[in-house]
Each structure stands twice: as structure tokens, then as C-alpha cells.
Image (cartoon, rainbow, N blue to C red):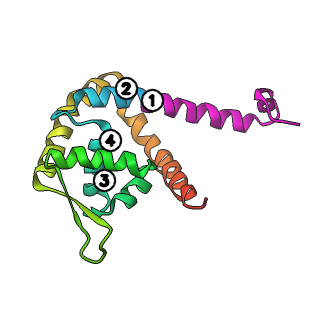
Amino acid sequence: MSKTLSSFDQEPEAEVLFSYFNEISIISQLSGAMFEKGLPFGLTNAQFSVLNWFIKVDSEATPGRLATAFQVTAGAMTNTLKKLAAKQLIKVEPDPNSGRKKRVTITEKGRNQLEQAILCTMPVFGELLQLLDSAKIEKQLPLLQEIRKTLDEMRYKK
């Protein structure tokens, strides 16, 4: 018997989980669009995310590692990296240990523009803080972090 939407009747926890992730997906789309409107320097969410990755995760990476981290194709990551390099926000250099690989690092200009971009988006968060209870959001952070960690680990098990 194939699964249908009525299968949720037998698995109410699955329906709750689906609804939960559906809400997260919608929030992601809406907040991403709102956030991107506040980004300066012609930055896109993808470009901002790559710059932020260098600050939060590691100071250098290969394009392949970045593509894996962001779960995008190598071509999509190459496109994002080319745009960032054209703005002089990153450097893409040959890896001294490999003739084929590239090494990507954030530039000082990239760090500065990332910091400015974060400051430029603060009005969006200020507006949200007037509408939402920050204490409730803070209480939800541990659960969201646990879900993120679980999903992050799951992607490497495939």
C-alpha cells in the first residue's frame, strides 16, 4: 500500500513534524527575502552566507567544500565565488599542495563589507523585535540548534 496524505491519520507525529518543517520553510523564504532587501553592496543571500561561513566556520576552503557545506552544485558555488571575487570580497588562488584545487579565503574588504551588511540588516530585526517576544524566541533557540545539528549530521550519512 502506498503512502498518501491520509497516512498522517496513522502517524500523527509525522504530521506534526511535517507541519513544523513546513512552517520553518515558509519562515526561511519570507525572512530570506526580507533580509536580502536590507543587504548592501549588491550582495545576495548566497553571497552573504559564504562570507559569513568564513567568519563562523573556517578561514579558508576549497570550492568543493563550500558547495558541500551549502548543499549546492559545484557550478552554483563557482558562480557565487566568481561574483564575490569580482567584488574583491574573497580571493581564489591555486592550492599550493595541488595543481588542480583552488583555495578560497575572505579578504579584509570582505570582512568589512560583511560587518557593514550585518549592521544594515539591523533595522529589519529591530522591527521584528517590536512585533515578536524575544524571550520566547530565545527559549526556542536550543531546539532549533539541536534540529540543525541533527540535520547537518544526517546529510553526511547518505
Can you identify the residue that label 2 sits on? 132
* Three-letter residue code for mark 4: Ala
Residue drawn 37% across and 29% down? 31
* Three-letter residue code for mark 3: Trp
Q: Earlier in the sequence, mark 3 or mark 2?
A: 3
Quadrant in the rendering for residue 62: bottom left
| Label 1 crowd (10 A; few <14 / some 14-19 / many >=20) | few
Q: Earlier in the sequence, mark 2 or mark 1?
A: 1
Q: Earlier in the sequence, mark 3 or mark 1?
A: 1
Quadrant in the rendering for residue 115: top left
| Label 2 crowd (10 A; few <14 / some 14-19 / many >=20) | few
Q: Earlier in the sequence, mark 4 or mark 1?
A: 1
> Of residues 150 and 111, which is closer to you in this image?
111
Marks 2 and 1 sit apart, C-alpha to C-alpha, by 14 Å
> Of residues 64 and 23, which is closer to you in this image?
64
Quadrant of the image for the C terminus? bottom right
Q: Is residue 40 above or below residue 92?
A: above
Can you identify the residue that label 3 sits on? 53
SS at mark 2? Answer: loop
Can you identify the residue that label 1 sits on? 27
Residue drawn 64% across and 37% down? 17
| Label 4 crowd (10 A; few <14 / some 14-19 / many >=20) | some
The answer to whether residue 94 is left or right of residue 30 is left
Evaluate if marks 3 and 2 touch, with contact meaning CB atoms under 8 Å apart.
no
Q: Residue 135 in the image: x percent, y percent? A: 38, 36
Q: Residue furthest front?
A: 99
Q: Main secondary structure of the magenta part?
A: helix
Can you identify the residue that label 4 sits on? 46
Residue drawn 15% across and 35% down? 41
Numbered label tally: 4
